[in-house]
Amino acid sequence: MEKGQHTLLLGDSGSGKTTLLNILGGLSRSETGQVKINNQDLSLLSNSKLDQFRSQYIGFIFQEAHLLRNLTLLENIKLAQSLAGKKVDISAISLILKQLQLDQKSEAYPNELSRGQLQRAAIARSIINKPALLIADEPTAALDDNNTRRVLELLLSIADTAGSTLLITTHDKRIKDQFSKMYILK
């Protein structure tokens, strides 16, 4: 994938989409092939260096938000900056929360957020460090048509603003018309 490209990875359940994402995102190691992000071959990194690289250059949006329950939304996002070795930037966090219509929820705990708010919170956490690669695994799973359109527009806009390469995996064929670059796993 070229830098800044938006790509859709389609495939039925069990076709290997999530496995491929895990390899591309450095969560799993491949026995063959090569994954390079920002000219860094991920296979050459030790586990600790790979963890550091991921936190700085890769943003993940999973089907579930995976926010820490005992931290507020703001604290969860601050933690993402800290883990990437970046200075906590409250103004950047505030701007992203405002863009995602979560500015009034910054002090809320995950159990106080709706499913849609949790999804947007996961997006905020994944983009705060302006990742080179933004990976979204089934971001429209279980959403109706209207919310699917909103989430897709949001992801495309945010990736463009952050200058991120966007890779979305899905079995949801409703969104394929929004992408010029598409791969289908069988």
Image (tube, rainbow, N blue to C red):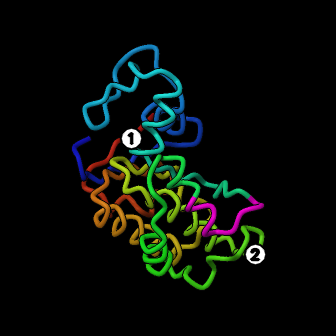
Label 1 sits on a secondary structure element that is strand
The type of residue carrying mark 2 is Glu
**Where is residue 123 drawn, in percent x and y?**
51, 63
The residue singled out by tag 1 in the image is 184
Name the image quarter holding residue 79.
Answer: bottom right
The label on residue 112 is 2
Work out which residue is located at the far front of the displayed protein and give it.
Answer: 87
Is residue 41 shown left or right of residue 117? left
The mark tally for this picture is: 2
Residue at 48%, 76% (x, y): give it: 94
Work out whether 136 lies above or below 104: above
Q: Tell me: 140 left or right of 162.
A: right
Numbered range of the magenta stretch: 69-78
Comparing marks 1 and 2, which lies closer to the viewer? Answer: 2
Judge by depth and name the residue closer to the eye, 167 or 140: 167
Who's the residue at 48% across and 52% down the image?
136
**The N terminus - image quarter:** top left
